[in-house]
């Protein structure tokens, strides 16, 4: 049996423990109050540019980040009276076309609503509706690797319109074929789901057009997507990449009349 003194000590400890628990309970904040209180570390700062809110609805139009836009605008501003070709139309691209007032700019767009955009004087905007679905990307890549009509020396450099290669975009305006392009930008069509128009034909056709000139700068946006990545490596080539910012890759293509291959090395293995 415990001594009387020990029993008294145990009773005192129990009383103090009970009082401490009651004090903590009274000091604890109400959960409903926390739901209406924003912690300073969780506050949203509206001045943070292009901050992604994963719980908000996606923006109506994906834009270039400041660094991506600067990479593109710096190159175009250094060129005078150049020929610009855009696959996809955005306000940012229209602003770049305005910088090139002494040159030529053509936009190829698959969304009829975007054709209503206010374009700078002298800029051509055309509707293109023959893009293959994004879900056919792998099938078309296999076709291009096996089919002789998809090689550079199979008449592609002289006539795209009559090609049997399934990756060639058909029905483009004559103005596209009749020029040597200094800069080509690929940011359309969306290709955001298997049934949506993909960028396979845009990247392939841009690569062919680039090989027709002495030197052409080609930019591909959204290279975090598998199609843009695959087709850039396949037809624009790792060896031709000169820079990148964010999801924007920059390639420089120079003419090589002695080869029918887009890239000097073997094709990229896709598992």
Image: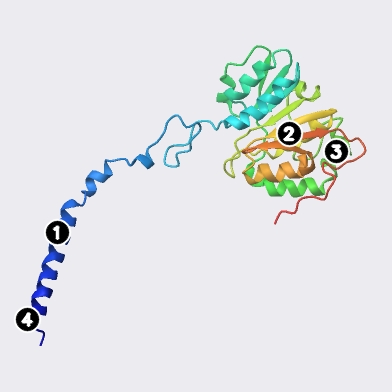
Q: Secondary structure at mark 2?
A: loop
Q: Secondary structure at mark 3?
A: helix
The earlier-in-sequence mark between 3 and 1 is 1
Q: Secondary structure at mark 4?
A: helix
| Disc 4: CA contacts within 10 A as few (<14), some (14-19) or many (>=20) | few
Q: Label 3 to label 1, Cα distance in Å?
A: 82 Å
- Tell me if residue 127 can be seen: no
The earlier-in-sequence mark between 4 and 1 is 4
Image coordinates for residue 122, horizontal then vertical, percent: 68, 13
Report which quarter residue 56 is drawn in. Answer: top left
Q: Label 3 to label 4, Cα distance in Å?
A: 102 Å
| Disc 1: CA contacts within 10 A as few (<14), some (14-19) or many (>=20) | few
Q: Label 1 to label 2, Cα distance in Å?
A: 75 Å
The earlier-in-sequence mark between 4 and 2 is 4
What residue does disc 4 label? 4
Residues at marks 1 and 2 touching, judged by CB atoms closer than 8 Å: no
Q: Is residue 117 left or right of residue 259?
A: left
Image coordinates for residue 76, horizontal then vertical, percent: 70, 23
The earlier-in-sequence mark between 2 and 3 is 3
Q: Looking at the picture, does residue 233 appear above or below residue 170?
A: below
Residues at marks 3 and 1 touching, judged by CB atoms closer than 8 Å: no
The earlier-in-sequence mark between 1 and 2 is 1
Residue farthest along the left direction in this orientation? 4
């Amino acid at each position: 049996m415990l001594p009387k003194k020990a029993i008294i000590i145990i009773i005192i400890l129990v009383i103090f423990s009970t009082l401490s628990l009651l004090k903590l309970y009274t000091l604890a904040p109400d959960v409903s109050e926390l739901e209406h209180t924003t912690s300073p570390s969780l506050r949203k700062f509206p001045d943070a540019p292009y901050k992604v809110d994963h719980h908000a609805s996606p923006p109506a139009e994906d834009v270039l980040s400041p660094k991506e836009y600067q990479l593109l605008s710096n190159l175009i501003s250094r060129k005078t009276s150049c020929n610009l070709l855009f696959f996809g139309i955005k306000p940012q691209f229209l602003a770049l076309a305005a910088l090139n007032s002494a040159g030529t700019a053509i936009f190829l767009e698959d969304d009829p609503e975007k054709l209503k955009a206010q374009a700078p004087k002298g800029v051509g905007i055309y509707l293109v509706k023959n893009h293959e679905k994004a879900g056919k990307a792998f099938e078309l890549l296999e076709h291009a690797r096996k089919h002789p009509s998809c090689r550079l020396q199979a008449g592609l450099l002289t006539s795209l319109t009559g090609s049997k290669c399934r990756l060639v975009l058909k029905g483009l305006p004559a103005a596209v074929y009749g020029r040597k392009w200094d800069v080509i930008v690929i940011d359309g069509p969306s290709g955001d789901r298997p049934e949506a128009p993909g960028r396979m034909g845009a990247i392939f056709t841009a690569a062919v057009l680039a090989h027709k000139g002495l030197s052409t700068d080609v930019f591909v946006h959204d290279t975090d997507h598998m199609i843009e990545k695959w087709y850039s490596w396949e037809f624009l080539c790792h060896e031709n990449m000169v820079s990148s910012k964010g999801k924007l890759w920059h390639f420089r293509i120079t003419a090589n009349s002695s080869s029918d291959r887009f890239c000097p090395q073997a094709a990229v293995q896709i598992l």
